[in-house]
Image (spheres, rainbow, N blue to C red):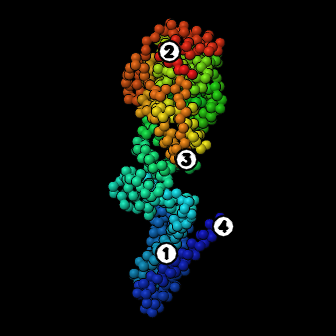
Amino acid sequence: MNAKLFIRRVYLVCYDVAAVALASYLALLTRFEFKPNAVGENYLDVLWGSLWISIVAAIVIFSAFRLYTSLWSYAGMTEMLYVVSACVVDTIVNMLIILLNHREHFNPMPRSYYVLYGMFLLGFTTFGRYFYRGFRTLSSRAGGDNGARKNVMVIGAGSAGSSLIKEILSSQHVNKQLVGVIDDAPEKQGTYIHGVRVIGTRRDIIEKAQALEVDEIMIALPSASARKIRDIVNICKETGCELKRLPGIYQLVNGEVSVSKLKEVDVNDLLGREPVCVDLGSIMDYVSGKVILVTGGGGSIGSELCRQIASHGPKKLVIIDIYENNAYSIQQELIHDYPDLSLEVLIASVRNTKRIDDIFAMYQPDIVYHAAAHKHVPLMEDSPNEAVKNNVLGTWKVVQAADRHHVKRFVMISTDKAVNPTNIMGATKRVCEMIIQTYNNRSKTEFVAVRFGNVLGSNGSVIPLFKKQIESGGPVTVTHPDIIRYFMTIPEAVSLVLQAGAYARGGEIFVLDMGEPVKIYDLAKNLILLSGHKPDGDIQITFTGLRPGEKLYEEMLMEEEGMQETENRLIHIGKPIEIDEEKFLSQLQYLKEYVVEEPGDIRSCIQDIVQTYSIQNR
């Protein structure tokens, strides 16, 4: 046993010995109105004759109720119930000890003695256990360098807010001064939580922050809706205070949030809407017991596809990726999380015809999810031939392999940048959609594409870039103050991709409803705030200008495509645009032969295929 812990327990035992003795004498003295001379000798003889047995019984009972093993620095209601229960039981046992030891007396002690004994014992025991905690709380409030303390306002007077306030008040490691609590509930206004007053509703945040010189605002609303969090964040932005959000205790217990990452930002907070929830269990029978192949399976979208597919019992999951680090990472994760999963992870390029054909021949996949692609707009603007080789020719080769080996369903991941493209990446993805449409008309395989916008947290997205810039002290770079984008989280997008795959009948271009567009400037400001800094104070935001091929606004549909509903209101079908398939295949063949010559005018070649492609001046 730890020496410090042993000393603490010895102290508590000694304290309880004194408490039992004092409670016994004071109970008798109180009965006789605090007049020692009025206490009869017979009562004192009974008291001293039974005292040592009562002390031993009390120590045994207190031990049984964990009064020597509880962590009293953080004692709460449970520990208080233990104290009360132990004192009640000890009072009953004390009465039995006295009655059994002095059976010759009809009434060896006054009847009120036992009640008074129990009351005094409870008072002494509670005082002894809770004194240190109270002393530490008071010293925490009074001690330290008050000038260096941050004034903190807590939003939320519920259980999470209560826990947060209690921790701030009692912890020796937190140097913060609580100045008030905000809550919208009318009945809580003017009340106190652990001595801290509820000072208003969200409408009062700006006024109170200024009046009380608040430095930091903590949002303790772990179960609040995303829209409510967004509204509160928007109000808090006006104060210029640092902003942090407390996750729910259940998230800590479930391992969803680690203590070391309490300041990490939940990307759903930045979207300002409810997360998209899809009941995959009801529609994922189509992957159960099937051989599923995922290209680009180590990437952001591909790896999440693999996770969600693995959880629905495929016969075999085959992952293809050219980047070995990503492939290894998802392989180890799936081996750990799904030890019974039949898994194959292969290093291969979708541009290698023979390698792809051999893989299809060996594993005979039932369903293919094609996520492999070059997606980074500025990089592809600098290397347009590589965009064509990987996106167009790579997709074409995987589509041909799927056709040759009679794959039942082929789902390609597309992008909103394929609509009226202004960059080579978007234009190549539009060519890929045309490949899907053409081969669906010529094959028994059901070929479909799923088109969606930006994915928060994916490789190459603004979130990892902004976080890195914030960690290095800024500045955070935004291309244009008015640029907007549609956003989803990775799990949201992938769950809708899987559901769209269930709806597929061949030839569709599924379009995911991305919700309201998000202004990138607001996204940057909120991310800075939720990381505990002040925009344009601690962290500067600078505008760098639109990059080559970049739009201010993205579109999800071309005018000619129209919109058709599905069973899921978040998944729509764009009507395929009629194309001259023979001409298109001829253009593809020419493109295949021409791009290997590393031409300087590949954009013009793509524009001949994609009439809506607008080449930007570089």
- What residue sits 52% from the left and 26% below the top? 550
The image shows residue 594, relative to residue 43, as above or below, that is above
Q: Amino acid at mark 2?
A: Val
Disc 4: which residue: 3
Q: Amino acid at mark 1?
A: Phe
Counting other residues with Cα less than 10 Å from the Cα at mark 2, is it few (<14), some (14-19), or many (20 or more)?
some
Q: Nearer the viewer, mark 3 or mark 1?
A: 3
The image shows residue 408, relative to residue 461, as above or below, that is above
Disc 1: which residue: 124
Cα–Cα span, label 4 and label 3: 46 Å
Cα–Cα span, label 4 and label 2: 78 Å
Indicate which disc, 4 or 2, sits on the residue closer to the N terminus.
Answer: 4
Cα–Cα span, label 2 and label 3: 46 Å
Q: Residue 528, position in %: x, y? A: 52, 43
Q: Residue 394, position in %: x, y? A: 59, 18
Disc 3: which residue: 538
Mark 2 and 3 residues: CB-CB less than 8 Å, in contact?
no
Cα–Cα span, label 3 and label 1: 52 Å
Cα–Cα span, label 4 and label 1: 25 Å
- What residue sits 50% from the left and 28% below the top? 288
- What residue sits 42% from the left and 84% below the top? 30
Q: Amino acid at mark 4?
A: Ala
What is the quadrant of residue 357 in the picture? top right
Q: Nearer the viewer, residue 222 or 284?
A: 222
- What residue sits 50% from the left and 32% below the top? 480
Q: Amino acid at mark 3?
A: Asp
Mark 1 and 2 residues: CB-CB less than 8 Å, in contact?
no
Say whether residue 336 is visible: yes
Cα–Cα span, label 1 and label 2: 85 Å
